[in-house]
Image (spheres, rainbow, N blue to C red):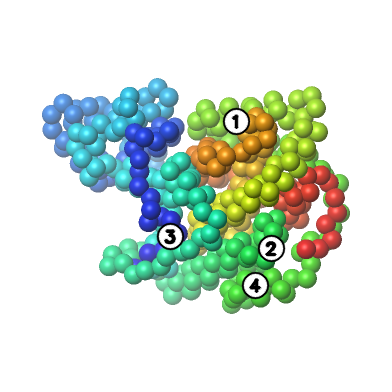
Amino acid sequence: MILRYPKYYEEFTCIAGACEDTCCAGWEIDIDDKSYDYYMQVPGKFGERIRSSIKEYQSDDDMYESHGFILQEGRRCPFLNRDNLCDMILELGEDALCEVCTYTPRNFLEYGNAREISISPSCAEAGRLIFGSSRKVEFIEKESEETFALEESEEEIKTAEVIRRARDTAIAILQEESLEIEQKICYFLLYAKEVQECFNKNALEEVWSGEAEEWIRQKEELLQTENDTDSFGYFTRRLESFGGLDSINEEWEHYLERLRILFLGKGGKQRYEETLHRFRMYMKQKEREYEWEQLMVYYAFLFLARSVDDLNFWGKAQFCVSSFLMIRDMELERFYQNGGSFSKEDCVDIARIYAKETEHSQENLEFLADEFLFEEIYRYEELCWQVFIHALGKEGRICSI
């Protein structure tokens, strides 16, 4: 089997109690069947504590686990102690952890005789690696002795290869050095749209998987349209969309409320537009636009390949770009409250809050997928406008780039 992952993954280690957050609070903790059987046999008082902390899910869905831990106040794992350390590890060792605890904050996807691994910015330490370098993200591919567990037909293998190569081309577009970040994202959207058109007409052989630079050269005009929606109008509609998510933790709710207070109250429209413009100039002057590229590359690597399940390449691209836009809105609030400054730790913190709310909740991902499907602001042209307003700071007309 092939292993594939971003190079910075090799540097990741959990810092446990030294972390400012914890992976062990805020969401349901499922127990895989193998771990459940083990927990049922642990002897003594600690075994009794484990068994008294397990609940059975009332569901007939075979896709998910049947058991989970009963969360405590603050949605904390029952084995997370006051020092934010795991009593399970302290008592039984790391091998006693169930799968979700062992692998978090890692994301796994298996397809096309390969396992892809990434680390989520929902973990602050992972975020420091994702945003820690201005260098182009390098991806490692190597052989593993582990056997690929899934049985794939020839057609599935062919489709998986097309999707992988399309995903890699999309990432190469995002990493094209000759383009501004807004240009990269809009070319990324255009490419994803073209890939989806090939999927829709069952023409996988037409998907471009060559050099990104050559593909970009063939596109003389990316967007030529007029639009009378200003940056603030788009912001309010995005906020309405993301405000419909099921809240996983209080941080998300508090952040949305701060956005509403700052930008939806009296003078909010002007405040939003001026802050957007100032922040864009600030990041450019500080030469930190690469952080947005790293964010987009992370989400492209994580999500685009998931279209092997539904061939919805465009929907995954919508998630990537909408995530950039929503995180950017959150960054504006922090920039304003900081009095016109924005640190690397601010970037890590906001990406963490957003990732915890979206990436690890199937319900929220499904909600957003419906928004992307039915709401006009997530159409190709509208998304391009939102990205370019990010640069302009106000309404305008884009002829070509």
Q: Is residue 89 left or right of residue 23?
A: left
Above or below 384: residue 349 = above
**What secondary structure is found at the residue carrying circle 4?**
helix
Residue pointed to by mark 1 = 255
Give the mark nearest the N terminus, 3 or 2.
3
Circle 1 residues within 10 Å: few <14, some 14–19, many ≥20: some
**Which tag, 2 or 1, sits closer to the chain's start?**
2
Q: Amino acid at mark 2?
A: Leu
Q: Which residue is mark 3?
A: 7
> Of discs 4 and 1, which sits in the foreground?
4
Spatial separation of the CA atoms under disc 4 and disc 1: 39 Å
Q: For residue 179, which numbered disc appears in the image?
A: 2
Please state which amino acid type lies under the numbered disc 3. Lys
Q: CA distance from mark 3 to mark 2?
A: 24 Å
Between 9 and 301, the residue placed more toward the observer is: 9
Q: Quadrant of residue 274?
A: top right
148 vs 270, nearest the viewer = 270
Nearer the camera: disc 4 or disc 2: 2
Residue 217 vs 396, above or below: the answer is: below
Mark 3 / mark 4, whichever is N-terminal: 3
